[in-house]
Amino acid sequence: MPDSWIYNPSLELLSRDELDKIKLQRLKEVVYRVYNNNQFYRKKMKEKGITPEDIKTLEDIKKLPYTTKDELRESMPFGFLVTDYQNVVEVHATSGTTGEPIFMYYTMKDIENWSEIMARSLAAAGLTKRDVLQITPSFSLFTGGFGFFYGARRIGATIIPIGPGFSKRQIYTMIKLGTTMLAGIANYAIRLAEVAFEMGVDPARDTKVRKGVFGAAPWSEEMRRRIEKIWDMQAYDMYGLSELWGPGVAIECVYKSGLHVWEDHFIVEVVDPKTGEPVDVEEKGELVFTTLTKDAMPLIRYRTRDISRILDEKKCQCGRTHIKIDRIQGRTDDMFIINGVNVWPSAIEEVLLREPLVAPYYQIVIDRVDALDRMTVLVESKTKLGENEKVALAKKLEYELREAILVTPKVEVVDPGTLPRFDGKAKRVVVKAEE
Ligand code: DLL
C-alpha cells in the first residue's frame, strides 16, 4: 500500500464495543453541557419533554431535537456559544452564499481536536513527515486552509500555505519546492493541470505530486479518474463542514470505498430530508451530525442538507473500525427539479466525463420557456472540434444523459477555454429568470 499509515492506532482501531462506550459517555456529557449552558437547547429539550437523564443508550439520541442551519443563523452571533467569549481563540464562518454568514467559534481544545482529526485524515490519505504539502484552499474565514495546516503541522510534513489562485505561481512553487501532495478542491486540481500544460509542464512527468486530498464540493468518480491520470496521483475524498470545525470529519483510506467518520468525535445519522425520520443503513438520506467533543459550539443532531448513506460494514480492510459513509451526492439545495424529475449535478458530471472527447469544464443552465423547465448543458471539448463533430458529440451526450437522469437536456459543445474556471468551489448551475 502506498505510504498509508494510521496516525492514532489506539483510537482508530478500537473495537466496536470500546468505541460505543466512548460515544455514549461523550454523548451524555455534551447533552448535559448544552442543557445547562445554552438557552436554545434547554428550551428545545424542554419542549420535547426530555432532560439529560433520558440519554441512557446511544439509541436515545433519537429523542433529541434537531438543529438546523436556519436556527444557527437566527441565533447569530453568540446564541450557540457554550463558553465564555474570552476562551475563544479563533473564528471561522460559512461562506454565506445562502444567506448571512454563520460564525463558528474555536477554543484551544477545539483546535487540538480539529488538528487530531485532520492529522488522522491526512495520514489515511498518505501524508507523512517526508511529504511536502501544498495547501490551496484559502487561509481566511473559510476553514479549508487552516484545517489542512493544523493536521499537517501535527504530522510534521513540510507545509506550503499558498492558498488559492495565482496558478502559474502554484506550478512554479510546486516544481521548485518539490511538492508531493496537493490539498484543495477537486476542480482546482484540474485547473492547475491545465495551467501547467500551458506553461509547458506535464504534471505527471515534471512534478513530484503523487497524492491529493480533495473536498469542499461534490466531485464524481470520473473526475477522480481524470485527476489521477493527469497528475499520476492517488486522489482521496475528504468531507467536512464549517459547522463541524471544517475539513477532516470524514476521509477515504487507501481502499477508496467510502469515507471513515471519526466516531469518537461525531455521531452520524441519516434521515429522510423531508420527514426527518431515520432511514436504514445503506439507504440514502440527509446526514445529521452530533458533535461529541466540540467545545465552544457543540451541535446536537445538526441537519447538514448533504445527501449520502451509511455503509454496512463492520471493519474496513485498512483495519479502521470507524464507520464509513458514501461519497456525498450533493446538497439538498443543489438538487434541481426539471419538469418534476429530480436531477443532481454530480450525476451529470459522471456522464459527461465518461466521454474522452470532453474536458472537465461544464455548466448547467436552467430556464423556463412556455411554463416548462429547460436544461442546457454547456460542455467544453478537449480539443477544438468542427461544427459537425460538435453536433455529433452533443447528440451522443444528450442520449447518454437521458439514459442516466431521465431528463433530456440540450447539450452544446463549446470550444476549449470558454467556460469559467474556479479556484474555489465551482458554480455549476446557472438559473435564468423566466423569459
Ligand atoms: O468546505 C470544508 C472543507 C474544506 C472540506 C476542504 C473538505 C476540504 P464549508 O465551506 O462549510 O466547509 O462547506 C461545507 O461543502 O456541507 C458539503 O455540502 C460540501 N462538501 C464538503 N466536503 C465535501 C465532499 C468546507 N468531500 C459543505 N464532497 C458541506 C461533497 C462536500 N461535498
Image (tube, helix red, strand yellow):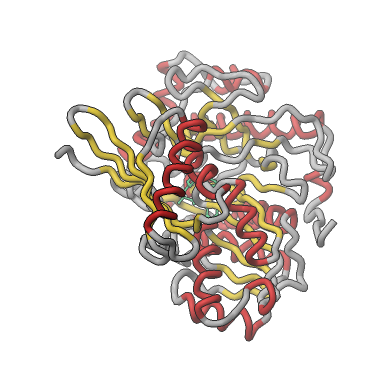
Q: Residue at x 47, y 41 (%)?
A: 348
Quadrant occupied by the N terminus: bottom right
Seen in the picture, residue 344 relative to 342 is either above or below; the reply is below
Residue 74 in sight in this render: yes
Quarter assignment of residue 122? bottom right
Q: Residue at x 50, y 74 (%)?
A: 195
Q: Position of residue 156 (x, y in %)?
A: 72, 70
Quarter assignment of residue 31? top right
Seen in the picture, residue 337 relative to 172 is either above or below; the reply is above
Seen in the picture, residue 49 relative to 430 is either above or below; the reply is above
Please state which of residues 193 and 153 is positioned toward the viewer in this rendering: 193
Quadrant occupied by the C terminus: top left
Q: Position of residue 422 (x, y in %)?
A: 41, 62
Q: Is residue 56 left or right of residue 284?
A: right
Please count the marks in the image: 0
Q: Residue at x 52, y 82 (%)?
A: 199
Q: Position of residue 377 (x, y in %)?
A: 38, 45
Quarter assignment of residue 196? bottom right
